[in-house]
Image (tube, rainbow, N blue to C red):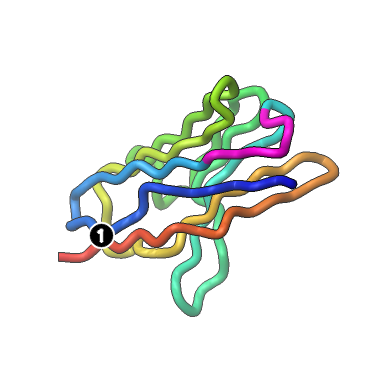
């Protein structure tokens, strides 16, 4: 059974930092492209950052230069370092694992940026 478990969300002031982590189990982690998506109330779920099996990274324009995605295939984890957070970054953040045949989601972790 595949599981993606996110952690590290919370409440932070504008300009602050958070680090999200996603622990994967039940899958051959190195065979998956991994990503972080987010969904704000009333909005669609959008890609924030992705890192491929070959360590190529992609970022949404809105987070470029502020967020950094990384993966550790030895620990089956993917992380998202978020700096210079803005109120518009407030959302539920979801971990995603994708291969040509499968697509998995975590349960999400809330990130709230507010003073």
In the image, which residues are magenta? 23-29
Q: Nearer the viewer, residue 104 or 3?
A: 3
- Residue at left 71%, top 39%? 26
- Residue at left 51%, top 43%? 49
Q: In the figure, is residue 104 to the left or right of 11?
A: right
Residue found farthest to the right = 101
Residue 60: x and y, percent? 49, 48
- Verify whether residue 27 appears in magenta: yes
5 lies above or below 114:
above
31 lies above or below 39:
above
Q: In the figure, is residue 16 to the left or right of 20?
A: left
Residue 84: x and y, percent? 24, 46
Residue 109: x and y, percent? 44, 58
Give the residue pinned by disc 1: 11
Q: Nearer the viewer, residue 43 or 1?
A: 1
Count every numbered label the image shows and give the total.
1
Q: Nearer the viewer, residue 113 or 9?
A: 9
Q: In the figure, is residue 51 to the left or right of 7?
A: right
Residue 101: x and y, percent? 85, 44
The quarter of the picture where residue 25 lies is top right
Residue found farthest to the front = 1
- Residue at left 35%, top 41%? 19
């Amino acid at each position: 059974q595949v599981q993606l478990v996110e952690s590290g969300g919370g409440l932070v002031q504008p300009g602050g930092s958070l680090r999200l982590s996603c622990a994967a189990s039940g899958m051959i982690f190195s065979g998956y492209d991994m990503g972080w998506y987010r969904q704000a109330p009333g909005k669609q779920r959008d890609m924030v950052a992705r890192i491929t099996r070959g360590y190529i990274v992609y970022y949404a324009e809105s987070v470029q230069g502020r967020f950094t995605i990384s993966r550790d295939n030895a620990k089956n984890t993917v992380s998202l370092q978020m700096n210079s957070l803005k109120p518009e970054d407030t959302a539920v953040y979801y971990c995603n694992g994708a291969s040509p045949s499968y697509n998995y989601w975590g349960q999400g972790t809330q990130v709230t940026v507010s003073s």
